[in-house]
Amino acid sequence: MNRSRADMDTIARAVGVSKTTVYRALHNKGRIHPQTRERILHVASELGYRPNLVARSLRIQKTSTVGLVVIGLTGWFYSHILEGVDEVAQANQYGVLLACSYGYPEKEREIIQMLLDKRVDGLIVAPADPEENREFYEELLALQVPIVLIDRYIPGLPIDFVATNNELGGYMATRHLLKVGRRQIVFVSNGSRERRATSVVGRFEGYRRALAECDICQTVELGPGLPDILPEEEYAYNAVSHYLSQGKELDGVFAVNDDVAYGAIRALRDYGLRVPEDVSVVGFDNQDTSAFILPPLTTVAQPMREIGQKAAALLLERIHKGRSAPQQQVLLAPHLVIRQSCGARLNGS
Amino acid sequence: MNRSRADMDTIARAVGVSKTTVYRALHNKGRIHPQTRERILHVASELGYRPNLVARSLRIQKTSTVGLVVIGLTGWFYSHILEGVDEVAQANQYGVLLACSYGYPEKEREIIQMLLDKRVDGLIVAPADPEENREFYEELLALQVPIVLIDRYIPGLPIDFVATNNELGGYMATRHLLKVGRRQIVFVSNGSRERRATSVVGRFEGYRRALAECDICQTVELGPGLPDILPEEEYAYNAVSHYLSQGKELDGVFAVNDDVAYGAIRALRDYGLRVPEDVSVVGFDNQDTSAFILPPLTTVAQPMREIGQKAAALLLERIHKGRSAPQQQVLLAPHLVIRQSCGARLNGS
DNA sequence: ATGAAAGCGCTAACAG
DNA sequence: CTGTTAGCGCTTTCAT
């Protein structure tokens, strides 16, 4: 880190003025003689001066850095969220300190502690579990740490939060399956750890509500119980295959995300069922790939990049406005992208 | 940032000792009376003391933070690299300051400047362009900034670098196509900006070499020239469709990555060509999805997470060992994953 | 075994 | 218009 070329003091000495004057010249603040300013600026660039932001941070008690903790990065979802956060952070001259919890609540705590020790100005986090770290978040709240949750929240805690309206998404997906005449619709989720996340729970609730509206009270869930194996496609493939091999029936699949849908479709096919003729399937996320597989996947699109942007914007607002302002819950609307995996529209793409 | 509860001075006063003693107790350094130590530790946790890492950084001239700049995060590739970096960073108590260049060389410079101002201890970067920022990197080199490049390098500059052996990957892919009897093999790349990257150039070179070995000197490249439109699937779809619509022929496709392969396959199908019966295609990256689409995609797998890990490890080594040690170029071996899109093995997965 | 004091590089209040 | 001084919270040298 010792590579910086010169500090303000060096410049001051070189020009023959005081450090304060250099400061004024560099920040164009307060009265300063244009000539002096020029000389200073010239020498500064001559010496390749660059401000030491850690010194500044220490002095002004603010780092212009936000901490971002997510479950993992390999999925379509968080990648996009991250870009959204990055965009607004860059636009506001903020840095982003990133770390993954990989789904472990205790790691999440460690990471956050570390970020706090590094004195980030605020935090954006996708909590690994809705319950495990409840007390921890209560403490953060008490400490007035600016924080906004994304994708998942901690029920009952007044923390700002931005996500897709997952319940609505699940409802829309299921309604669509119902509309194309399906009645034996199963919900395929992913690993059991993920299953507890409020986002997944929301999708399931939407699914349940839609079924209930049609007087179907039995919900069938595939996934939990199986060993947690990534990749998601494989997990789903196993879940659906297992269900089918027991002689159980289904004519519709609501997959918790597109990757899961791919795995489900493959399992159906391998079992001799045609999609969409025999079974309709709808996914969640609208990955780019979903428009190009066969059959093109009907899926619930959520505005991921916007979640990231909105979360960052909200956090910056919190950081600047401070403790005031009540909790904000931003729920972004999902929308259904109809393709061919449900048979609703066998042409088009 | 003012939310910290107590500093060393507060503790010192509370216990009735000096700041230095508190320091010794907290770090368990030097001689200190066990009793005093206990008392200090107790009061510290009582007060919820947390070290101020920015103060420490200023003092010791080291931030325990690395800067990471990538092109974008929405692809399979960088997501995985990032997790690799994150893993070893966490294991070594380092933080990761992340930012995306989105492919713009000037943004890349700005970002790096900002990271340097924040005094990161080192940088990991996937340079947007092999030429545009050449001088800039020469300066960084002169300034002795610890830096390792990933995925793409700047030809001629002695900067540490870790990536897949892309030339070999391209060669393996093309050899395979040749082996299954294909002779009219086209290379489908993506946007023209990306096309300049050394990783893509490498794949192309491997493709060319394999063809040359079979006395095929004509290479055909699809992609460059078309408007740069994301998503990649769509770009590839257009490129292949356009080629086909001109009445030109092909019996093999080497796609620069799996997403491009999906788009290509779809274009072939829509044109009435069967994969793998009429045309063989091989991709690059081995995304999880590739094993589940139809036909399962034959593709060149690269060890992405390892690239991230290795890059981080190499950087930390540089940071600690300093200027010594010659440039290191780490090329990780790719391997071919044979599925069914080439027809070499119509069973299995 | 403990303490005093200096200083990392910057900002900001106060004086002139 | 410019300079002096103090201090952010920590580490480290030198005394005691």
Image (cartoon, coloured by chain):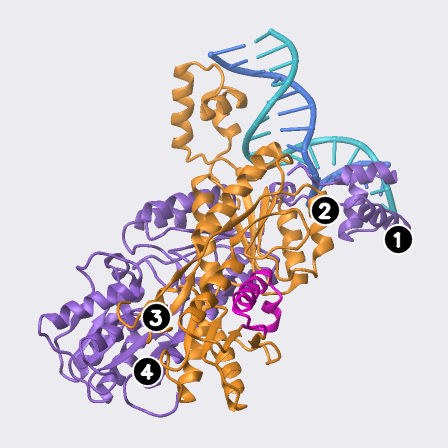
Chain colours: A purple, B orange, C blue, D cyan
What is the C-alpha distance between the residues marked 1 and 2?
A: 21 Å
What is the C-alpha distance between the residues marked 1 and 4?
A: 69 Å
Q: What residue is drawn where x is 66% and y is 46%?
A: B158
Q: Quadrant of the rendered structure where residue B108 is?
A: bottom right
Residue to which mark 3 is pinned: B344
Residue A80 image position (x, y, % from top left)? 46, 66
Q: How crowded is mark 3: few (under 14 residues within 10 Å), some or many (20 or more)?
A: some
Q: Are marks 1 and 2 on the same chain?
A: yes
Residue nearest the viewer, comparing B277 with B117 = B277
Helix, strand or loop for disc 2: loop
Q: What residue type is labelled 1?
A: Pro
Q: How crowded is mark 4: few (under 14 residues within 10 Å), some or many (20 or more)?
A: many
Residue B266 image position (x, y, % from top left)? 41, 82
Q: What stretch is highlighted in magenta?
A: B189-217
Residue to which mark 2 is pinned: A50
Residue nearest the viewer, comparing B64 with B86 = B86
Q: Can residue A206 be seen in this view?
A: no
Q: What residue type is labelled 3?
A: Ala
User: Is the C terminus of chain A in the top left, top right, bottom left or bottom right quadrant?
Assistant: bottom left
Image mark 3: chain: B
Q: Do labels 2 and 3 share a chain?
A: no
Q: Which amino acid does label 2 sit on?
A: Arg
Residue to which mark 4 is pinned: A295
Helix, strand or loop for disc 1: helix
Residue nearest the viewer, comparing B160 with B19 = B160
